[in-house]
Amino acid sequence: MFDTLPKTYDEAKTWDWPKFEPFFADLEARDLTPETVDQWLRDMTAVTTVIGEIMARVRVATTQNTQDAEAEAKLKSLTKDLMQPMQVVVTRLNRKLLDSGITPDNYEMPLKRARAAVEVFREENLPLQIEDQQVGLEYGKITGAQTVEWDGAEVTLIELMKSFKNPDRAVRKAAFDLFADRWVQDRQAINAIWSKAFDIRKQMAKNAGFDTYRDLIWKQRGRFDYTPEDNATFHRAIEEVVVPAAIRARDRRRQRLGLDTMKPYDVDVDASGKPPLTPWVSIDGFAETSGNVFDAVDPQLGAQYRDMLAAGLTDLPNRKHKGPGAYCTTYPLTAKPFVFMNAVNSDGDVRTLIHEVGHAFHSYATRALPYEAQRAYPIEFAEVASFGMEMLSSPYLTTANGGYFTESEAARFRIDHLESIIEFWPYMAMVDAFQLWAYDPANDGGSPDACDAAWLDLKARFEPDIDYTGYDAYKATGWHRKQHIFRYPFYYIEYGLARLGAVQLYANAQKDQAAAVAAYRRALGMGGTGNLPQLFGAAGLRFAFDSDMLRGLIDVLEGTIGELETAL
């Protein structure tokens, strides 16, 4: 019967739960033996990929236009009437497989994740998941509608941020003042969203039998290889090793700019005083140029990227009411990835596109794995795929390679990129430490005022050198500007861990680029069949996040920055 499932999204988009239910009933009714388990898993993969495609397409629609009421209503309806019943029956199917005692080939880690999912599943949390999703949509509506008047035109805040790179400090300040004021205008609305989300998540943890939402998330996300205490160790190592390096980087910029203090509108401008880099003339040209860069990294990767372009699986330019940020998702039935971003012709567009296409390469690499659960790689390594591609592509950004920049422009870009990695780790620690603080029952995490105070404490610890005088409200509400806190709770430590892997990958590539790329692709192809140490190891990397590891990586980054400065 499984050969009657839809083969394309056009065929699938009208399917509802009553059409899918017989397929799940068939899976529940079958006997599981070592001889039948392979087909059983393949059939379960067949039906869940169709549902995954439907959900992915609708989620994308809600981000492409945050004012699309039809898409929002459809997402809410599908979550309730399709995803919820599927979650219930998939939990029973996972329990059936676990009870059988059968371990299919190359399925140890998927079984471990399935066991954790069964343990945390509570049917009473399903409506709360819809409410939590709705909170995220509300946040997206607010941020997607943020615009200001600049140079006689209405621009999005993302577009306005280009002016933070203007060599004229007065222009930067004027743009930043508008930016900060616009965010503060939404302070009460975002606070209300936070309080609502906090209460929902607290109830979900209680329903699942956990003392804290943090503990629920840890098991739900399958974090088997590190603990919250390890996160705190990582934070301390960053404070010891990376914060001084970040201060050194900003101090170099401050001195070159001839400033007494670094204001928040000074941190993005090029220290050379040159105009901001503009990597493209047209958005289509930008997309094509990026293909040349990926070709240079690896011809097969370049072909995969061009396959996406040919299929129309990108949405690159910024526009009003487009959701914030960038992401890559997979359309599992189509078996291809989709990349979303907000390009505004700034150098950040280059990093963002390369990053998200790194995720896309991960999606392509796992297609050969037979079961959907094997393709579900841990987020920590998903981000190695993306940040790793940023590093592997860095030698090929020049026009000589068909890329975006002259040699001196590429040096500017790369210095900024490497310094941004150094400056990112302290920011990541702030976001992660904030969430650990917020969901600790000993703290008043549901209170926006308490959250403001906690954020200010973290600012003093991890970013002590930037002068926010005159921007008190903006500074205190910095946590408002990290959408992960609102939409993807506890999803941020992954970026910090992954950049440890990415910089190691870069160090390996400096010795042998071809071997580093081959190891990268080999590890991506493992999908979710290994734990984090195994996946890192397959890529030739070490999964560690102590002070010694960070010292070595800071040496690599600062050493490369010194070399690139000679090309300016």
Image (cartoon, helix red, strand yellow):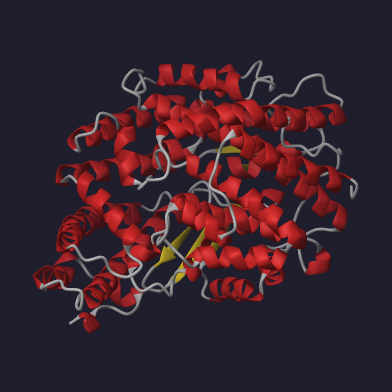
Residue 153: horizontal and vertical position, in percent?
65, 43
Query: Seen in the image, is 378 located left or right of residue 355?
Result: left
Could you tell me which quadrant the N terminus lies in?
bottom left
What residue is shown at x 37% (from left), y 30% (from top)?
A: 194
Residue 68: horizontal and vertical position, in percent?
39, 53
Residue 140 in view, yes or no: yes
Residue 163 in view, yes or no: no
Residue 303: which quarter of the image? bottom right
Query: Seen in the image, is 274 located left or right of residue 366?
Result: right
Residue 396: horizontal and vertical position, in percent?
76, 63
Q: Nearer the viewer, residue 276 or 422?
A: 422
What residue is shown at x 86% (from left), y 39% (from top)?
A: 272
Total residue callouts: 0
Residue 330: which quarter of the image? bottom left
Residue 159: horizontal and vertical position, in percent?
64, 45
**Residue 133 higher or lower than 446, as above or below:** below
Q: Nearer the viewer, residue 119 or 286?
A: 119
**Residue 379 higher or lower than 248, as above or below:** below
What residue is shown at x 59% (from left), y 45% (from top)?
A: 500
Residue 281: which quarter of the image? bottom right
What residue is shown at x 70% (from left), y 31% (from top)?
A: 246
Q: Nearer the viewer, residue 485 or 193?
A: 485
**Residue 15 higher or lower than 387, as above or below:** below
